Image (spheres, helix red, strand yellow):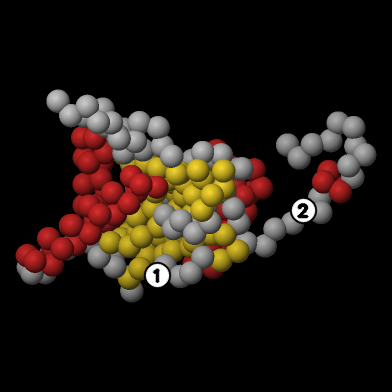
Amino acid sequence: MDTRQRTQSPIVTGTSVIALKYKGGVLMAADTLGSYGSLARFTDQRRITAVHNTTLLGAGGDFSDFQFIKDKMDELEVYDFNQDDGCDMNAPEIYHYLQRLLYHRRNKFDPLWNTVVVGGLHPETGKPFLGQVTMIGLAFEGDYVATGFGHHLGIPLLRKHWREDMEEAEARALLEECMRVCFYRDCRTINRIQFAKVAADGVAIPEPVKLDTKWDYSLFVNTKSEFGGSW
């Protein structure tokens, strides 16, 4: 029996990934902080990647396990290329593949400590597709999803403001606001955010950007307040 154990307690981790559908595709965002325990150690850990230029893949949790998942996606791309049959895995297929992978690893008691978000387009209808898979293989689809602390801070904002007919600019502004709130409240994140989108013309993952922040709220400025607090 192999007595080695891997990733029984994550070391370098990433927090929130938030994604939503909009009128023409899917937008996804994640900060670039890699936390070594509670230490903000790495500031350029990018947790969103593309598969086949048709699918966005983002993950929260252990960064080394995310790298393992990326390697699996690379293997699938090489396999599809070698088949040369014109059939590449699309977003729903990758979503189901990851659900089986994560569930399989959970059953081996050697889980991949990630919550994975998959975005793309349905190959038949062209409509946006968005799904999430947890580290135990629980999978579900939704109009918007989030991992980590973003599930508690971002989802309420999305429930209030998301619309099915949102244009890209509106969706981007809403996503920025969600990530800004996460930055204010989550000590495991920074304001350096990677945004990505997938639409009919493919995947776009530009360089990370820094969010504008505001710290001159009265409870921060008026330090003489006896019972004031930012919560």
Q: CA distance from mark 2 to mark 1?
A: 32 Å
In this picture, residue 169 sits left or right of residue 231: left
Three-letter amino acid code at disc 1?
Answer: Ala
In this rendering, the answer to whether 130 lies above or below 53 is above
For marks 2 and 1, the one nearer the N-term is 1
Whether residue 152 is visible here, answered yes or no, is yes
Q: Nearer the viewer, residue 202 or 2?
A: 2
- The x, y position of residue 40, in whole percent, is 57, 47
Mark 2: few/some/many CA within 10 Å (<14, 14-19, 20+): few
Say which residue label 1 marks: 204
Label ID, residue 53:
none
Residues at circles 2 and 1 in contact by the CB criterion of under 8 Å: no
Q: How many marks?
A: 2
- The x, y position of residue 90, in whole percent, is 23, 59
Residue at the spot 60% in from the left edge and 43% down from the top edge = 186
For residue 141, which quarter of the picture?
top left
Whether residue 174 is visible here, answered yes or no, is no
Task: Please state which of the two labelled residues, at mark 2 or mark 1, is closer to the viewer.
Answer: 2
Residue at the spot 77% in from the left edge and 53% down from the top edge = 215
Q: Nearer the viewer, residue 210 or 44?
A: 44
- The x, y position of residue 129, in whole percent, is 33, 55
Q: Secondary structure at mark 2?
A: loop
Three-letter amino acid code at disc 2?
Answer: Trp
Residue at the spot 79% in from the left edge and 36% down from the top edge = 229
Considering the image in quadrants, where does the N terminus appear?
top left
In this rendering, the answer to whether 231 lies above or below 22 is above
Considering the image in quadrants, where does the C terminus appear?
top right
Say which residue label 2 marks: 215
Residue at the spot 44% in from the left edge and 58% down from the top edge = 46
- The x, y position of residue 172, in whole percent, is 53, 63
In this picture, residue 218 sits left or right of residue 128: right
Q: Secondary structure at mark 1?
A: strand
